[in-house]
């Protein structure tokens, strides 16, 4: 091999150059003409083309490149675009300028014969085979189109180390696939560009140029033993690399590239197409893994949530515990799948030390992968018979983190630990506890409508139901299997250390096995805990057996929602199923019992007794009472309210069924109402179209069934009222209503602005009948003009005190369902003295004032011409003279004062 070849080979292998010899041309400047490549196909602006002409008469024979005229039925030879000449029987020209776009044909200048592009033969236009009916044949024309090109970075910024040094780069063209590109940058040399595009690839040990495609595969394309002055010229005189088959996506690696802004130029080697894009290289520091929280606190048996921050990397190794100090450790390789710089893991302290480590360190979310987990220590993994028999002790455990997966690679070392860690944290495991249990109840349809579709850790809707009053704490619950109104029951348990039993292999809370996990202790070999119900009053000298939750109701009749953050879980139970399972009757009292056993696991110290919490609930037959069981009287008007009480759960929907008993006025009304926390409900019905004197029965119903006794009712005449108020002036403290007619007595309320505005005043009690010139003092004086709306109100409770606050008490008189009103504009006037007001008494001045005499304040005020002096109720010449005399005396006194 020549020295030149050796030099080229060394250069190519060191830089891992990528380029191609393109099928129809070469990308190197100064290349000699190749064999014919012009055919009846598509070419791109800027390409160089050649064709061997079969009938040449030597060098310098002229040919013409003309357009294709497609205006007629057959393509014909069109206008001249360029004249070219042969050299060694070859026509060689570039597709630029006037040949940059369009359809073209080559003809001999002297004869006008057309050149076939497949053979180089020249024929008259009509002699093509097959004959095109005196038109051009397809083998005689070629197309030229401009090539587009985009070469863009996916981000505008890239780092200098680790994963941050990687950035995606795409080269694409809409009209072409097989093409090569040259890549260059003013501030990057060939070696740097080669490193950026080839990444961390090993240098190949064979001869040849290399290609990197979207799968990061490499192929040997050209043997460099083919010496070429063009090759040498290209690589000696330019700082660029070349990629063949460039179309595709690339991941570029800017590791150790200097900080700064770079413009990367990408150009097609054989066509006039190029693009550039900018990238900023910033120093991102070293690869590093650290803990988001230096101290993570949890209880024994629970699951600790640990977050690892990743800088310039998406991989880390995490260790919990130390072999020497804690006699236990667990170590795992962690990957951040979405490159957001954080990986989340869960550490199951209940499973730690037993069995497979994959159940100990788990992914904390869907974007984190746990690759490998190992655990060990003095006696770990333990030889206990079941998980939970020997749980980690309550103490502090070191947490170590280091970037990368570079620890668990020695399968022969039984004590693999992290060395040279990036960060240290603490897992603080505390003692667990069983704190409390309480019983809540909810309307009978809550379990089916709001609970069954919740995920095991979806606690927010449960708290929302509590906040809205749909779930309420209670010591009693309504039952009535015949009418299907059994309150649903929710048992809330506050106990830590249980989470580890309810985490699946993906790190998610799952409570599907709650029923099978709950059960009796059975001499220390049974369940860890039990939730059940027992008779709270079984009688003297007897114990009530606990009815386990799984024995009381079927699995699909209760759901467990786990609040991991607050060490609390809710067991929501279908009320009908629980009433049937327990066989409850009126006034039966049961206790909900939650026990964590001291013998079945290591959750409770063996020296302690089992931990038990209970809460009682009394089951009572569902009842409802309307109007205190008194007859109901309503008016033939809208907005008539019928109230009642019940012992069913608050927020239960109660329907008040109102059915006519008068054949001449038949009707059926069914207004609904929700039970309030104090056990009352109020339904509102419209009787405006019903006849006074008609009788009806009222019955409360829940879930379509009657609850409680029915009550008789009667419709009476609707009270009527009129009111009139006129535009007026006022000092802002009161308004006057012209007249009112109240059939049942009551009040006049004044609203500001409109009927829905604030009530700013009301009258005292007004007797039934007509009233005139009713003066109403406002609650607060008004200081500007306003609209006063007068609205008559009833005195529904008969105490002659206006008490309306938007409820049923002292409601407004209505007509056709709307409140009776009238409105007026009130002009607020200033408080000025009237014509009958006397001027303020002043002390008469003496005829000869002394040096110490001074004019009175009022005299000064008069002299200044105030409104008070001007509006004094007096007139006539005599009064004017008196005023003038007083003014002169005041001036004289003022002059004397100044002289002194």
Image (tube, helix red, strand yellow):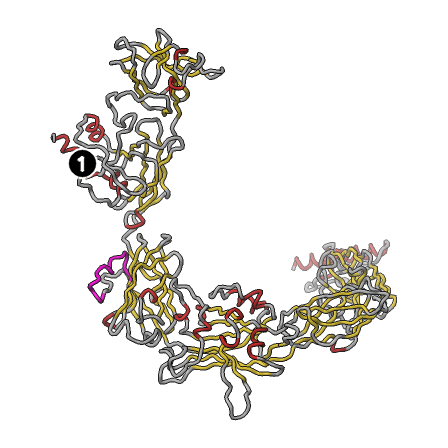
Q: Tell me which corner region of the image, top left, top right, bottom left or bottom right, holds residue 86.
A: top left
Quarter placement of the C terminus:
bottom right
Residue at horizontal 39%, vertical 26%? 146
Question: Residue 822 in the image: x percent, y percent?
Answer: 80, 58
Q: Main secondary structure of the magenta part?
A: loop
Q: Is residue 292 above or below residue 248?
A: below
Towards the viewer: 224 or 493: 224
Point 32% across, 70% down: residue: 352
Query: 635 or 379: which is nearer to us?
Result: 379
Q: Quadrant of the N terminus?
A: top left
Q: Callout 1: helix, strand or loop?
A: loop
Q: Position of residue 275 (x, y in %)?
A: 36, 33
Mark 1, residues whose alpha carbon is within 10 Å: few (<14), some, or many (≥20)?
A: some
Q: From where the camera sits, is residue 24 visible?
A: yes
Q: Report whether residue 844 is seen.
A: no
Q: Which residues are magenta?
A: 401-415
Q: Which residue is outermost to the bottom?
A: 541
Residue 189 image point, x, y percent: 24, 36
- Residue holding disc 1: 207
Residue 393, placed above or below residue 147: below
Of 698 and 339, which appears nearest the observer?
A: 698
Question: Residue at 61% of width from left, 70% of height from top?
Answer: 444
Q: Is 212 in the magenta?
A: no
Residue 85's x, y, as percent? 30, 12
């Amino acid at each position: 091999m020549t020295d030149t070849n050796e030099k080229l080979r060394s250069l190519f292998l060191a830089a891992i150059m990528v380029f191609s010899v393109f099928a129809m041309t070469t990308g190197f400047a100064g290349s000699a003409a190749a064999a014919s490549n012009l055919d009846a196909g598509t070419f791109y602006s800027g390409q160089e083309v050649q064709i061997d002409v079969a009938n040449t008469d030597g060098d310098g024979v002229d040919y013409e490149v003309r357009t294709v005229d497609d205006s007629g039925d057959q393509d014909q030879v069109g206008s001249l675009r360029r004249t070219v000449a042969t050299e060694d029987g070859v026509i060689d020209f570039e597709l630029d300028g006037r040949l940059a776009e369009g359809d073209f044909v080559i003809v001999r200048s002297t004869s006008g014969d057309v050149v076939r592009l497949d053979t180089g033969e020249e024929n008259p236009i009509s002699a093509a085979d097959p004959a095109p009916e005196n038109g051009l044949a397809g083998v005689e024309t070629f197309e030229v189109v401009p090539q587009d090109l985009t070469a863009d970075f996916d981000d505008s910024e890239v780092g200098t180390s680790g994963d941050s040094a990687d950035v995606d780069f795409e080269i694409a063209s809409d009209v072409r696939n097989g093409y090569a590109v040259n890549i260059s940058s003013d501030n990057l040399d060939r070696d740097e560009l080669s490193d950026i595009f080839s990444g961390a690839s090993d240098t190949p040990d064979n001869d040849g140029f290399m290609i990197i495609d979207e799968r990061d595969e490499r192929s040997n394309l050209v043997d460099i033993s083919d010496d070429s002055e063009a090759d040498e010229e290209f690589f000696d005189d330019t700082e660029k690399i070349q990629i063949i088959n460039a179309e595709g996506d690339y991941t570029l690696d800017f590791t150790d590239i200097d900080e700064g802004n770079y413009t990367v130029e990408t150009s097609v080697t054989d066509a006039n197409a190029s693009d550039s894009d900018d990238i900023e290289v910033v120093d991102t520091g070293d690869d590093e893994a650290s803990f988001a929280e230096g101290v993570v606190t949890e209880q024994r048996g629970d699951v600790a949530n640990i977050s690892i921050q990743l800088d310039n990397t998406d991989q880390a190794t995490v260790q919990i515990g130390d072999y020497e100090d804690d006699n236990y450790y667990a170590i795992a390789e962690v990957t951040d799948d979405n490159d957001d710089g954080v990986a989340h893991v869960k550490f199951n302290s209940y499973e730690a030390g037993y069995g497979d480590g994959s159940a100990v360190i788990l992914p904390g979310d869907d974007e984190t992968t746990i690759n490998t987990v190992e655990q060990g220590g003095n006696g770990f993994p333990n030889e206990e018979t079941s998980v939970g028999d020997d749980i980690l002790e309550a103490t502090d455990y070191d947490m170590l983190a280091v970037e990368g997966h570079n620890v668990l690679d020695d399968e022969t070392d039984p004590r693999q630990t992290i060395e040279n860690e990036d960060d240290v944290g603490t897992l603080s495991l505390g003692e667990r506890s069983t704190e409390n249990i309480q019983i809540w109840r909810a309307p009978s349809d809550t379990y089916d409508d709001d609970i069954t579709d919740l995920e095991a850790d979806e606690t927010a809707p449960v708290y929302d139901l509590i906040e809205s009053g749909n779930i309420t704490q209670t010591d009693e619950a309504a039952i009535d299997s015949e009418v299907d109104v059994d309150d649903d029951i929710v048992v809330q348990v506050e106990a830590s250390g249980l989470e580890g039993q309810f985490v699946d292999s993906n790190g998610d809370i799952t409570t599907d096995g709650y029923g099978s996990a709950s059960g009796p202790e059975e001499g220390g070999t049974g369940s860890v805990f039990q939730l059940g119900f027992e008779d709270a009053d079984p009688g003297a000298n007897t114990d009530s057996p606990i009815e386990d939750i799984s024995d009381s109701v079927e699995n699909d009749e209760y759901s467990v929602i786990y609040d991991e953050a607050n060490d609390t879980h809710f067991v929501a139970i279908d009320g009908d199923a629980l009433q049937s399972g327990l066989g409850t009757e009126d006034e039966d009292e049961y206790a909900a019992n939650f026990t964590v056993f001291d013998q079945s696991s290591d959750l409770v110290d063996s020296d302690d007794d089992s931990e038990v919490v209970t809460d009682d609930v009394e089951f009572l037959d569902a009842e409802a009472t309307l109007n205190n069981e008194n007859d109901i009287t309503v008016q033939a008007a809208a907005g008539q309210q019928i109230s009642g009480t019940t012992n069913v759960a608050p927020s239960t929907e109660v329907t008040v069924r109102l059915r006519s008993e008068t054949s001449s006025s038949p009707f059926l009304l069914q207004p609904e109402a929700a039970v309030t926390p104090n056990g009352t409900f109020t339904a509102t019905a419209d009787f405006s179209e019903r006849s006074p004197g008609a009788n009806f029965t009222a019955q409360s119903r829940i879930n379509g069934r009657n609850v409680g006794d029915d009550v008789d009712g009667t419709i009476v005449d609707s009270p009527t009222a009129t009111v009139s108020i006129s535009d007026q002036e006022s000092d802002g403290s009161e308004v006057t209503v012209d007249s009112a007619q109240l059939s049942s007595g009551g009040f006049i309320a004044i609203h500001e602005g409109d009927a829905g505005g604030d009530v700013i005043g009301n009258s005292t009690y007004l007797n039934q009948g007509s009233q005139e010139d009713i003066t109403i003092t406002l609650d607060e004086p008004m200081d500007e003009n306003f609209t006063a709306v007068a609205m008559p109100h009833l005195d529904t409770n008969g105490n002659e005190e206006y008490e309306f606050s938007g409820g049923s008490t002292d409601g407004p008189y209505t007509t056709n369902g709307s409140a009776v009103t009238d409105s007026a504009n009130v002009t607020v006037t200033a408080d000025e003295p009237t014509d009958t007001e006397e001027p303020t008494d002043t002390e008469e001045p003496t005829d000869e004032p002394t040096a110490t005499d001074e004019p009175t304040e009022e005299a000064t005020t008069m002299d200044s011409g105030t409104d008070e002096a001007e509006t004094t109720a007096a007139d006539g010449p005599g009064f004017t003279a008196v005023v003038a005399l007083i003014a002169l005396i005041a001036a004289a006194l003022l002059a004397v004062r100044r002289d002194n």
